Image: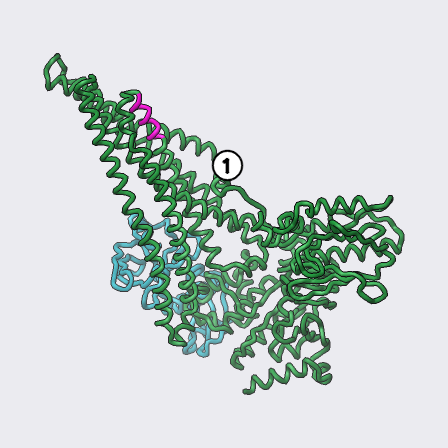
Chain colours: A cyan, B green
Amino acid sequence: MIDLISILQQPDVRPIRLFPLTDPERWVAILDSKGQEVACIEDPATLDATQRAALDAALAKRHFVPVIRRILMITRAPDGHDWLVETDRGTTTFRIETDESIQSLGSGRIVIIDKLGTRYLVPKITDLDRDSRRKLERYY
Amino acid sequence: MTRTAFTGLSTVVFHLTLPHASPNENPETLLQNAEKRLVTGERIIARLFTDLDWNLHFHAGLIVLTNLRLLHVELAQFQAWKLEEVQDLTLEEMGATAAIHLMQADSSVWHWRITVGHVREVEAFLAKLKEQRGTVTSETEAAVDEEDVFSVEEPETKTSTGQPLVRLFKFSSKWYKLMLLGFVLTVASTASGLIGPWLTMSLVDEVLIPLQTATSDVLIGRVYHFVLMLAGAAVLTWLLQWATTYVISRVAERVTSHMRRATFEHLQKLSLTYFNKKRTGDLISRIGSDTDNISLFISVNFIDFACDVMTILFTAVILFSLNPMLALAAIGPLPIVAWLVQWVRSHLRGGFAAASRAWSAMNSVLSDTIPGVRVVKAFAQEQREIDRFREQDQQIFDTNDRVNRTWSFFEPTISLLTDIGLLVIWGAGAWSVAYEHTTVGVLTGFVLYVGRFYGKLDSMSRFVASAQRAASSAHRIFDILDVKPDMPITSGMLKVGRLSGAIEFRGIKFRHGSRQIIRGIDLKIAPGEMIGLVGPSGAGKTTLVNLACRFFDVSEGAVLVDGHDLREIDVVDYRRNLGLVLQEPYLFFGTIAENIAYGKPDATRTEIIAAAKAARAHDFILKLTDAYDSMVGERGQQLSGGERQRISIARALLVNPAILILDEATSSVDTETEREIQAALDHLVKGRTTIAIAHRLGTLCKANRLVVVDNGVISEIGTHEDLMNRSGTYARLHQAMVEVNQA
């Protein structure tokens, strides 16, 4: 068994999700400062509590994929569309450039990549409220 | 018929339709002639029609192979050789034609000439001859299938045809219930649309006029009664039209959806040969926009047309039943309209055809320029492309402008004629009201009906154009559906399961069109062996690999895998044993994980990651923002050539193939990438039979044997060291390669 805690305490070591959009809960790789993989954890749930907590903390520092709960408004902008959305991390606006920035990941899961490269996730379109779905439908 | 003769049909049809062939020269006559010449106990084994004479003029002839003799049959000529006297028949290709020599004592004593398109049949015939001579010498009577030579099928023969619109109708007959319902609804909604004027007529005669003239007691309440009925008729019409439109659109959607699927499914079954011949854009537009045209035709134009015809019939009946004299006056201008429609149609037909040609010319500029935008920019040819586009666009403008000129004249003319028709009605009607007891109500009804009548004539004329468009679209779809796959999936039914990977090329030859690409190759590859194919470009390396994948079938000889002829094995089953890494790795639009798992969609994430690691792709994948979830392919992440290559290696690794086909990129990559790819490949080839079109030194040195292919034959075989020492073709090629790399 690898000593996760001491690995994570080393400088510049970072955990990476291998499937950040389709399976964020599992498959975490730990990279050293040179970008080499030092460990790969298939299922963090199998770790003991302290290791898990350390891993989650390290992941939480880096992971940023807001999950869209509601789409409040989509307006046409000169070079794309401005979205006003409510996410699990609060309400925000972002701009996407083309319809191609909205990508399907299969089984109703979509990811929206804004102009600046931030990913916004909709885990399941059917779970959105009717109003949001209508707004989304016009672009996706 | 004459046109199809030149698109490569089987011999029989070809001779039937030769433009200069006299009626007596048809194959049946020749065959009958041949049969008359048979002696007792003689039977026909195979036959071959020739299409040229010695001076290369078109002339029908027949060579017949019997169990005893070889016969030459022409209309006025007959020649026979005993089989024992025939040393051999040889085929000599001479560009667009070929000659078959009859050899006796090592010299040609007779020859036939044919166009080169029939060489495949000749080869089949020669094979029969060889077989028959074997039987003669061993004196065993084998039952030979007489029809064999006939059934040698030309690739992708087109069957056909019939009118595209009739076929379209047959195609949609599957949904006849829904269509019947749609038809009934159409009739009902048309009829209900005609109730309104009828009620108006009664309203005027029974209520309004009496009210005004106050000649009799009329209840004002009857007005409400009529208004209510009119409202009811309007609502009924609305409901029926709604139902009609919906039902018909549904049928149209069903038909086109079925058509799209059928076409795509059919396309997937066709061999690479077909795709090599077709332009991608053209196929896409056939499945996309042509089916759309058809859908529009069925759902909108056709239903409109049906309604129009019905309305015209109904109104005509109503008009005549009301007042024959007035009716006659009303439809007086009809012949003029009919003539006008015909005139416009003939003008438009050419116009539409020109417009769609101009349109596709513009499309081809687009599909040329947009994917090639890097080249355009690199050579600073933007202005030239703009000019090219402008020129094509001007064409569209001009043709459309011409069409519009006709249209713009046509529509107002129709409405002028309608107005004239109405004027006639008003005049004749007024006279009739004054002297002939026609009521004002009937006259009002007449005016309303006649208005409808002419309105429908106008929209009917539009139907002609859309029907023509739909017909040409249907034709383009059936064009694809009529292509028979040249390698029927059903031909080989042997299920092989997991192969060990022994491959044998046994005397194979391959011809593409008139070009002989493989001229006879014999090669045995042991399971797990790695073969490097080397040779100048155009030598036939890729063809050899394609034959091993069974993308094409050999013209002669056989490819054997684990001792089975490839043609007997189920293609799908066989290809499961196959891993392919191509020169230009193709990534589909989707995530990296999906791309790696392309050959095995149910692969677990563990397997995907393991494959990526083995292919040295894991590390760079981790550096992407979305790791394995990163989108790649046309609209996705830009990956470097080496990275794409490694993903395609991972893809091949994941299916764990018994046989690996490797087409190495000719372009050299940087040393670091080269090393990474090489490491990935080392993993991949381990324990698998590998055929590599090799360019990299690493692969060349690692291969168990290098096979040097030159001009369709093997010129050298050996290891890298062997061949270098021999200083033959390989040594020269290698020297050139090293020099290029150093330059």
As drawn, is B697 to the left or to the right of A3? right
User: Residue A105 appears at what percent x and percent y?
Assistant: 43, 57
Front-most of B470 and A58? B470
Snapshot quadrant of residue B112: bottom right
The answer to whether residue B682 is above or below residue A88 is below
Residue drawn at (62%, 48%) of the image = B17
In the image, residue A105 lies in the stretch drawn in magenta: no
Residue, far front? B76
Which residue is denoted by mark 1 in the rendering? B174
The answer to whether residue B268 is above or below residue B503 is above
Q: Which segment is the magenta one?
A: B310-320
For the question of whether residue A7 can be seen, the reply is yes
User: Residue B188 appears at what percent x and percent y?
Assistant: 35, 27
Chain letter of disc 1 in the image: B
Q: Give the dominant element type of the magenta stretch: helix, strand or loop.
A: helix
Residue drawn at (69%, 62%) of the image = B98
Residue drawn at (87%, 54%) of the image = B136
Residue type highlighted by circle 1: Lys
The answer to whether residue B204 is above or below residue B575 is above
Front-most of B68 and B53? B53
As drawn, is B89 to the left or to the right of A14? right
Q: Secondary structure at mark 1?
A: helix
Snapshot quadrant of residue B94: bottom right
